[in-house]
Image (cartoon, rainbow, N blue to C red):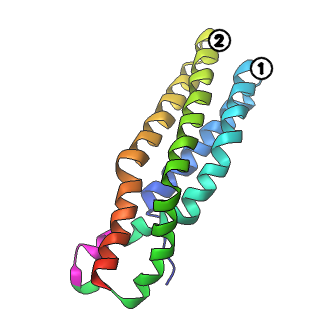
Amino acid sequence: MAFKIPQSLELEHEELHQRLVDAIKEGGKVGEASKAVADVLHPHFEKEEEYALPPLGLLSSLVERDIVTQEMRNVLTMTDKLKADLPHMIEEHKRIVAALDNLIDVAKKENKTEVIQFAEKLKLHAKTEEQFLYPATILIGEYLKSIF
């Protein structure tokens, strides 16, 4: 069974990635600061797409207890990996936010409003992951363990 990231999250990641590419294309100090964000963000996004977000695709099925299948047990590898790696993922968020704060400072000096808005949106995205998405992924694993 393939576990798919919910489409809304996939699209949000794609939008954030594209806006970062656009900010890099600005060139100058904004481009350099945006590249520094990309350097810390890209490996983090890869981890999220590998194991932190795909289990969330099961949420709608899990609200109906009778839709739990043995194949769903395979998601436990991902949820356990996120649970073990959570402190590191949060630390990566701190580095990403620090790079975004620098980008915001640079963009303010150059009056790049769209870049500032993008950076603020990405900071909010990281907070949403910490407060909701990562815990939900871990809870999916714990819930499935209680059934199996």
Distance Cα–Cα, label 2 vs label 1 = 10 Å
Residue most toward the bottom?
70
Check residue 101 for magenta coloring.
no
Q: Amino acid at mark 2?
A: Glu
Q: Amino acid at mark 1?
A: Gly
Residues at circles 2 and 1 in contact by the CB criterion of under 8 Å: yes
Q: Secondary structure at mark 2?
A: loop
User: Looking at the picture, how far across and down is residue 129, in whole percent?
Assistant: 43, 48
**Residue shown at the point (67%, 51%) measured from the top left:** 43
Q: Which residues are magenta?
A: 59-65
Residue most toward the top?
109
In the rendered image, the vertical position of residue 44 relative to residue 31, given as above or below: below
Is 92 displayed left or right of 136 in the figure? right
Q: Which residue is mark 1?
A: 28
User: Looking at the picture, how far across and down is residue 70, in whole percent?
Assistant: 38, 90
Give residue 110's mark.
2
